[in-house]
Image (cartoon, helix red, strand yellow):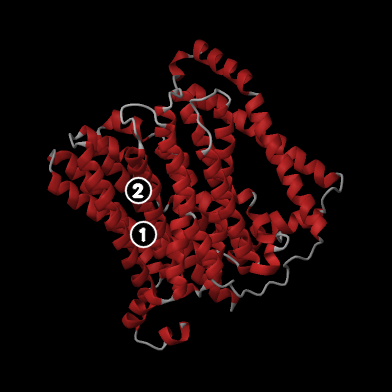
Amino acid sequence: MRAEIEQKPPWRRSFAAWTDSRVIAMFFLGFSAGIPLLLIFSTLSVWLSEAGTGRSAVTFFSWAALGYSFKFIWAPLVDLMPLPFLTRRLGRRRAWLLLAQLLIMAAISSMALVDPAAHPGNLTTMACAAVLLGFSAATQDIVIDAYRIESVAPSMQAMLASMYIAGYRVGMLVAGAGALLLASHLATNPDGYDYPAWRLTYLAMASVMLVGVATTLRVKEPSVERKDLYTYLPSQYRRLFFLFVLSAAGFALTFFASGAWFQYLQDLLRLQVPSLGHMSGFIVEVPRFFLAVVAALTIARLGVATRFVDRKMVEVTYAFPVRDFFSRYRLRSALLVLALVGFYRLSDVVLGVVANVFYLDMGYSKETIAYVSQTFGLAMTLLGGFFGGMLTLRFGVNTILLLGAFLSAITNLLFMFLAGAGKDTAFLALVIAADNLSAGLATTAFVAFLSSLTSVSFTAVQYAIFSSIMTLMPKLIGGYSGSLVTAFGYETFFLMTAVMGIPVLGLIWLVRMTMTAVSQGDR
């Protein structure tokens, strides 16, 4: 199929690529990846709120999704450790993918079978199931990313990325608005809490995951030659996995056990320095987090020092992927690449944090926001993704990466004009169309760019690291979006987000120049 496509003229090849079975399969895998996230966040929050759960307890459940941010920690295990029976029958990627999907179904079903309003202890059971869901969903993401990169040549990565993003968005729509509508339709008591309706809704979401399972069983295992696969005994892999579990348990126990002590420090700090306000929580929580990290690292070092696990095996699993990246791109080029990865989506993410609040403050109704921002916006994002895939295949990743960054910055200026124009639904639709089209195009090119950075020997690990870096800085700065709006107003804030995109254009140019120099030096 790939050979047939490559013999055609460029534009015909771009359109014909949509019929590639690997491209179509990626839509369904993306759909499978998009289901779990909102079942931990917004949909679960509505369920728990209806059940009478306190607001603070509801927000604690969002921690179950931390696995998405720290998936690079166990990505090496997914990359290297074979699974009994499954790996022999399905192959390395499909085995882990099937296991993750089955665990996701089990976690969602477990949540469905627990009524949080029946007994206080049920919240703990629900939390455990939510943590399993977050961990399993993040594992599925690790494998899908690796599978996508290994399935096709770099020139086709944008096509697979656009279909993955499209499927992911549709999956989120089903798990978000779809689940809420289903729960509302099944409820026999519309004005009160109805556990049977929520139980059936979550069981339905678990069954929807069968789309991903069927796709996993249907697709072919990528044919990638790696000399380092499974060079250790099964017992050594089991020990490494057990050490990872112990380290994770040490992190969790230290973090939660120290909660009361650090809460006392936070209260004391607020009393002594009232001007800090909410910053006191940040000041206290950072050392609490690092204390938990130290506990986890101590357990890991003890495991290596006592020879419970092989030191060389740990180096191969965790150190080699990082060394490989820096050795391929050299220090200066590698640091520029990491800077680009961390800042490419900054302007869009920072704006997106306050987008819905902005719409409400402008006087738009919730129905208008739902139809124009969510439904129409989703369609524009998918269209942008499709254009991004074809344009990247036609003109290359670097060109569309630069175009996406430029359009993302320019469309942020449209929000500034919208803030000055006042309530205007037609203008709102125009702004959302432009913003989502550019976001879909930019994201598709960016995912293709990240895929091109990975080495076949460390696909899952390196991409997991890149995706974690990609969200870290935007999330940190995005947390101050509300404060910036309060201090400067919406028009100035949107101008600031557009200006944030200017350094990214320079980074793209520098990365292109340094990577070209590195490739010429290697010759």
Tell me the quarter of the image containing the C terminus: bottom right
Q: To which residue does mark 1 refer?
A: 442
CA separation, marks 1 and 2? 10 Å
Q: Quadrant of residue 126?
A: top right
Give the percent coordinates (x, y) of residue 347.
35, 47
Q: Does residue 404 appear in the picture of this structure?
A: no
Crowd rating for badge 1 (residues with CA inside 10 Å; few <14, some 14–19, many 20+) = many
Side of 433 relative to 293 (left or right): left
Crowd rating for badge 2 (residues with CA inside 10 Å; few <14, some 14–19, many 20+) = many
Give the percent coordinates (x, y) of residue 248.
68, 40
* Residue visible at 46% across and 64% down in the picture: 449
Q: Does residue 24 appear in the picture of this structure?
A: yes
Going by the numbered disc 1, the residue's amino acid type is Ala
Labels 1 and 2 touching (C-beta < 8 A): yes
Going by the numbered disc 2, the residue's amino acid type is Asp
Relative to 180, say whether 340 is above or below: below
Give the percent coordinates (x, y) of residue 326.
62, 60
Q: To which residue does mark 2 refer?
A: 348
- Marked residue nearer the N-terminal end (1 or 2): 2
Q: Secondary structure at mark 1?
A: helix
Q: Residue at the far top: name it.
A: 271
Figure label count: 2
Q: Secondary structure at mark 2?
A: helix
* Residue visible at 53% across and 67% down in the picture: 149
Q: Quadrant of residue 49?
A: top left
Judging depth in this view, the residue of 472 and 231 nearest the camera is: 231
Give the percent coordinates (x, y) of residue 308.
84, 47
